[in-house]
Amino acid sequence: MARIAVIGAGMGAMATAARLAVAGHRVAVYERAATYGGAVGSFERAGFVFDTGPGLVHLPAVWRDLFLKTGREPLEKCVGLVQVDPASSHLFADGTRVTLPNASRAGIVSALDAALGGGAGERWGDFLGRARDAWDRSRRPLLEEPLRPDRQLLERDPYPALRQRRLLRTRQASTVAEVGARELADPRLAALLDGCVLGYGLDPRHAPAGASLLPYMEQTFGSWYVTGGLRELARAVYERCVARRVEFVFGAEVVSVVEKDGRAAGVELAGGEVVPADHVVACTGAVPPAGRELWAAGDVRPRAEAAGGLPGRFTVLLALRGARPRSAAHRTVVHSPDTGAEAEAVFGGRLADRPTVTVSRPDDPAGRPDGDHEAVTLSATVAGPSGGVDWSDGALRERYAETLVDAAARALGESPGALRERLLWREVLTPAETGSTPAPALAGPGGRHLHPANTTRLPGLYLAGGHAHPGGGLAHAGMSGALVAGLIVEGADFRGSQ
């Protein structure tokens, strides 16, 4: 039985801890905050409950597998998991609105054809077919296997872009934005693709075409809501860890990884206490310093942030009078009229004038005081905490909140004034409170969108969570836990999750 110290109590950290504890190891989790869950948080006030991080699950199989492998109770016995249908409603800049069913390619094609016309649904369906090829080609090395030094497969874009002959030259889309412009041939379809990719913290102007597997993943495997909010999933994972005798130490900041005899030998806490360990798993964006360089030439290193830093989320929580209409969509996306300008602002450290805004209206009695009130969450991708926007400026926060409220009014089919008359109170959260949004790992030229491997050059030190392979996102964080646990339990012979 090995002693294992896990740094951080986010979803990837807890997924790692639960699997290692079941394998017979003694696991202790050190979290500098006062609670677990990382980005999967909630805000409660006067009977209203809001998610402050992700609001939907898109690959529930990852979490089903965790609960299956760590105990007798399956996921659905620990949380209420509800398939969201319709999956989403989309309002475009020209006023066109389309509602997309959940996990039905034929239904999506039909809905787009009816709303947009001109063969839009057929083009989107053909695009999903190519995106499926990208998923099939890269799914296992991107999600289910450790990142190997021999990773040539992930340094090529897996998306089979159409070859188009123009002006005596044959061209292929190499970025998400180019896929939208050249293959989808409708600014609304392009906005649908760009908005999805931007929501994952990626710049559609530069993200490889292979990022198209992200909307494919959502539209194929569906969107799921956890009753009571995603925080309930975090609670269930935490309780599974506790049931497997994982020790949690909150308010414990790890300042360094201890090295002894050429390997990780524990962690040092703020205040000087040293906790011995046979293995250390770091699940935070900034790996605590150790006694040696953790990466060598040719390794994928932590990403150097662009001028705008890693993006984050600007979130507005609305407590409203009035019942939620039964016909309301759970999620409505109000698309920016210019996603290129939006991305330029986000990744350039500025605020977009017309951002893409997601409006979440879960039909969940646990989230509101009674049936005569409604809890609505608005969110937009923005420059992150180090991105150049002064998130401490109260006037700026309130002005931008008004921008999102105006977009929400369009989504709800109300005038901005009518929506404000329903408002009891609102809460504004910025990246200063919620942090940055690490993107999922992607295959592409030069491996520029990969994350550091789960192993490091210091034996005994491993990486999990959104800043390590396979990157950000709820499902990806859960997979990082499976990969690290496999590497510790099975060693270098571990070939990936089954």
Image (tube, helix red, strand yellow):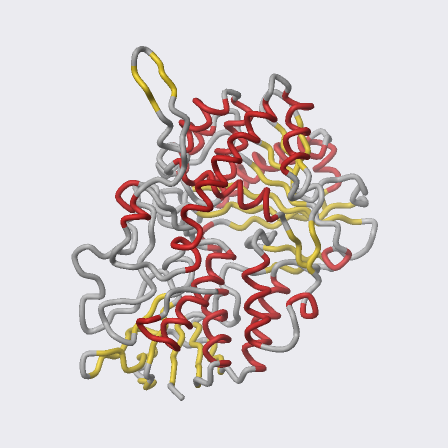
Say which quarter of the image contains residue 410. top right
Instruction: Give coordinates of residue 347: x percent, y percent.
Output: 37, 38
Would you say residue 283 is visible in this rendering?
yes
Image height of 162 relative to 332, above or below:
above
Of 260 and 2, nearer the camera is: 2
Instruction: Give coordinates of residue 147: x percent, y percent.
Output: 33, 59
- Position of the N terminus, as image quadrant, is bottom left
Image height of 489 relative to 39, above or below:
below
Total marks shown come to 0
Q: Residue furthest bottom?
A: 1
Instruction: Give coordinates of residue 31: x percent, y percent.
Output: 44, 73
From the viewer's perspective, is 496 left or right of 452?
right
Instruction: Give coordinates of residue 160: x percent, y percent.
Output: 41, 34
| Residue visible at 59% across and 71% down in the picture | 68
Image height of 302 relative to 490, above or below:
above
Image height of 210 relative to 150, above or below:
above
Say which quarter of the image contains residue 48. bottom right
| Residue visible at 44% across and 85% down in the picture | 26
Q: Residue furthest right?
A: 371
| Residue visible at 68% across and 39% down in the picture | 101
Would you say residue 409 is visible in this rendering?
no
Of 272 and 115, nearer the camera is: 115
| Residue visible at 38% across and 41% down in the picture | 158
From the viewer's perspective, is 326 left or right of 231?
right
From the viewer's perspective, is 420 left or right of 210?
right
